[in-house]
């Protein structure tokens, strides 16, 4: 076994950083083995500390929709850097970002920037509780909204009862306020509202799930969630941290013609730098300090470098100089991956589901159609781990978990997608 620079770096990291990583999923715990370290990235490619080039289907978990280190985004950051890194005051970039977000996503009448998706969803929940003066919230099994206490909760026994902590350190009193239900189940949702009349502040969901693998809603499900929240005076929060500007310029809410009350954003709007945002109806957003009683703040919120990068990324979604919409190209690339994997699995006699929409996809080795957390678990995670490493050995990096989504960038268009599909097909054939 050759000794690698990544091995050396990981050994040093393990001494000083819990698990050797600054975010758990990077540790490869669910697929086994040790993570590689990346020293550079460009286009569809990661360059590891040992100079291996990998075709990347993680895209830094979503932000790199234009590929890594896009020259236009890089130039925007460099230009902003000439004037400093952070002012702690309002700056022109924040206004331009707010104008772009509210134009791309019309349900967002006002928006507040923050520094991560976790901050965005945590703040949106607090705002919903403050606006409705209710304490309970509903989330769905398999949906991940970052690591704030109220959202690290899984279904208690009998999903209608209160949740219990999904992490040590979350007080039971917090968990009791979070109801966890099955996704794609309108009966459970109606029952939860009936069992908690006048107590539910909001329903938060990933309208297309990207943290349990990729799962799309049944026809009519999102409309049913919208109807029941309106009926009971609860707010509907779309967590589009992952799907925002990726599934469509206006996110899932544009594609599905659903108008949520609040939307959480992140990833793409930072162009690769740390950003989150939440926004929605003005009457709700105006409850935020300094106007209203709901407090929310952030030292680096609206940071000029992050705003400049995000503005460049959003503008490229309108026109990246290719003469065609990035979304039609991204969907073609997504279908190419889906078709290649399904064909290879079929040839091998392996049951597989490859849900895909645009540039998001995932691969479940199961014969069961995957429509929620329970059916996602029917996927053979051990087989996925073998597939993951077979691809990695041949130069393709998939998300290091059977329960994550894959992401494609416009930079994959061309030789990279063809080579990646060939590698994934061969990896399946040799499983
Ligand atoms: P961050 O706090 O990681 O910026 O965002 C949290 C978050 C909120 N909502 C959705 C729908 C998300 O997907 C995320 C974060 N996604 C994970 C990927 N599964 C980030 C990767 C990680 O945790 O390292």
Image (cartoon, helix red, strand yellow):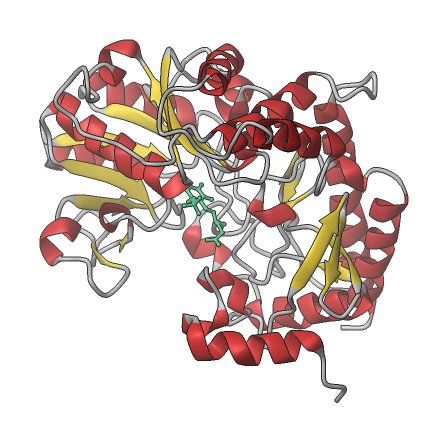
| Number of numbered callouts drawn | 0
Q: Identify the residue shown where x is 55% and y is 69%.
A: 28
Q: Quadrant of the N terminus?
A: bottom right
Quadrant of residue 383 within the rendered picture: bottom right
Quadrant of residue 221 within the rendered picture: top left
In terms of depth relative to the viewer, which is nearer, 140 or 372? 140
Q: Identify the residue shown where x is 45% and y is 20%.
A: 94
Q: Quadrant of the C terminus?
A: bottom right
List x then y, in percent, for residue 168: 23, 65
Quadrant of residue 131 within the rendered picture: top left
List x then y, in percent, for residue 329: 78, 28
Residue 47 is left or right of residue 214, and the answer is: right
Q: Identify the residue shown where x is 69% and y is 60%.
A: 39
In the image, farthest residue toward the bottom: 1
- Viewer can see residue 188: no
List x then y, in percent, for residue 18: 41, 72
- Viewer can see residue 237: yes
In terms of depth relative to the viewer, which is nearer, 321 or 330? 321
Residue 286 is left or right of residue 209, and the answer is: left
């Amino acid at each position: 076994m050759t000794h690698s620079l990544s091995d050396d770096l990981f050994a040093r990291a393990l001494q000083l950083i819990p698990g050797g990583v600054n975010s758990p999923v990077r540790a490869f715990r669910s697929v086994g083995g040790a993570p590689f370290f990346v020293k550079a990235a460009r286009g569809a490619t990661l360059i590891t500390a040992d100079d291996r080039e990998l075709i990347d289907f993680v895209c830094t978990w979503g932000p790199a929709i234009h590929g890594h280190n896009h020259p236009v985004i890089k130039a925007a950051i460099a230009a902003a850097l000439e004037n400093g890194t952070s002012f702690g005051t309002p700056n022109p970039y924040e206004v331009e970002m707010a104008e772009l977000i509210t134009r791309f996503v019309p349900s967002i009448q006002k928006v507040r920037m923050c520094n991560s998706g976790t901050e965005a969803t945590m703040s949106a929940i607090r705002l919903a509780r403050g606006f409705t003066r209710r304490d309970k919230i509903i989330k769905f099994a398999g949906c991940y909204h970052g690591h704030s206490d109220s959202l690290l909760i899984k279904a208690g026994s009998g999903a209608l009862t209160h949740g219990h902590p999904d992490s040590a350190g979350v007080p039971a009193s917090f968990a009791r306020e979070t109801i966890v239900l099955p996704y794609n189940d309108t009966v459970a949702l109606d029952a939860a509202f009936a069992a908690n009349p006048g107590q539910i502040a909001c329903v938060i969901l990933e309208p297309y799930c990207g943290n349990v693998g990729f799962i799309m809603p049944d026809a009519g499900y999102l409309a049913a969630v919208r109807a029941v929240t309106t009926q009971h005076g609860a707010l509907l929060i779309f967590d589009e941290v992952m799907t925002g500007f990726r599934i469509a310029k206006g996110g899932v809410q544009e594609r599905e013609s659903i108008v949520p009350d609040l939307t959480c954003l992140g990833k793409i709007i930072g162009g690769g730098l740390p950003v989150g945002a939440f926004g929605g109806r003005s009457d709700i957003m105006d409850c935020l300090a300094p106007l209203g009683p709901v407090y929310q703040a952030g030292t680096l919120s609206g940071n000029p470098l992050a705003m400049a990068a995000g503005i460049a990324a959003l503008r490229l979604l309108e026109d990246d100089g290719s003469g065609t919409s990035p979304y039609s190209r991204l969907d073609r690339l997504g279908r190419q991956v889906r078709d290649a994997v399904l064909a290879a699995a079929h040839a091998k006699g392996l049951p597989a589901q490859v849900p895909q929409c645009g540039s998001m996809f995932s691969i479940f080795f199961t014969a069961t159609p995957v429509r929620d957390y329970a059916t996602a678990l029917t996927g053979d995670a051990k087989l996925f781990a073998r597939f993951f490493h077979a691809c990695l050995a041949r130069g393709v990096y998939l998300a290091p978990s059977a329960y994550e989504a894959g992401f494609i960038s416009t930079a994959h268009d061309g030789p990279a997608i063809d080579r990646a599909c060939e590698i994934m097909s061969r990896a399946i054939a040799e499983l």
